[in-house]
Amino acid sequence: MTVNVLPVLPEIVVLAGASIILLADLFLPDARRHVSYWLAQFTLLLAALVTMQTMNTSVVRAMHNMVVDDLVADFLRLASFVAVSLVLFYSRSYLALRGLFRGEMFVLILFALLGMQVLITANSFLTLYLGLELMSLSLYALVAMQRDGRAPAAESTRCSGTSAQDSPPGRCRRPARHADARAHGTHRTSPRRSTR
């Protein structure tokens, strides 16, 4: 029995491109990180070209009816490729300033895109679940990439109780009631429990 791989050929291109970038980045010095960036952009361009070449007006099902390819799926694929390419293009300086302009970032973005492609062409709950997990795990790793920055949850917890007028932009101060209490010497401390 022959397997028709044309409906999933764009996904194969994205997977192959991400794997090549992952291997090539091992041998690239820090001064040549732009090679991984252009490889990611070339992968997106090649996947878009493959999508347009395999575009078909009829509905095509493959992989034991687990994948469906139609005009809606092709349009969503092309929109995803263009969106990710623009995100990579406009975030170059942002990533470079924070030390995130490296191959791992591009590989995770491509794997998140691959999960989106699987979701787009899914024709069963199993394929839908695989695409959702692939996209979610890649996005979790992308969130954890910036280890030097303060976590948003910790920052919001630290700033709870303060107003925008009390704090300068990007910095939180102690609430005014605690500052006034310490200045007048009326700040109460909780009594210590005696240990026996």
Image: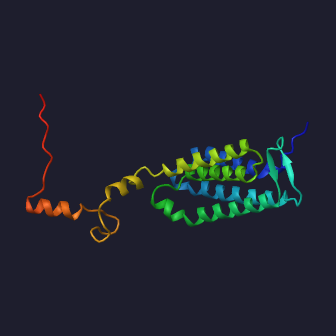
Task: Relative to 76, say whether 12 is above or below.
Answer: above
Q: Nearer the viewer, residue 161 or 78?
A: 161
- Residue 15: give x, y in percent of width and height: 70, 47
Looking at the image, which is closer to me, 112 or 73? Answer: 73
> Seen in the image, is 165 located left or right of residue 33?
left
- Give the quarter of the figure containing the C terminus: top left
Q: Residue furthest right?
A: 1
Identify which residue is drawn at 65% across, 64% down.
83
Q: Is residue 41 left or right of residue 188?
A: right
Vertical placement of 174 versus 124: above or below?
below
Q: Residue furthest top?
A: 196
Outermost residue, left direction? Answer: 185
Residue 151 in view here: no
How many marks on residues? 0
Across and down, in percent, residue 138 comes to 58, 48
Question: 87 or 165, which is in the foreground?
Answer: 165
- Pick the quarter of the image with the N terminus: top right
- Which scheme is used to colour this image of the protein? rainbow
- 185 with respect to 112 (left or right): left
Outermost residue to the bottom: 165
> Quick one: 27 or 56, which is closer to the camera?
56
Left or right, 42 with respect to 4, comes to: left
| Quarter of the image where one finds residue 4 | top right
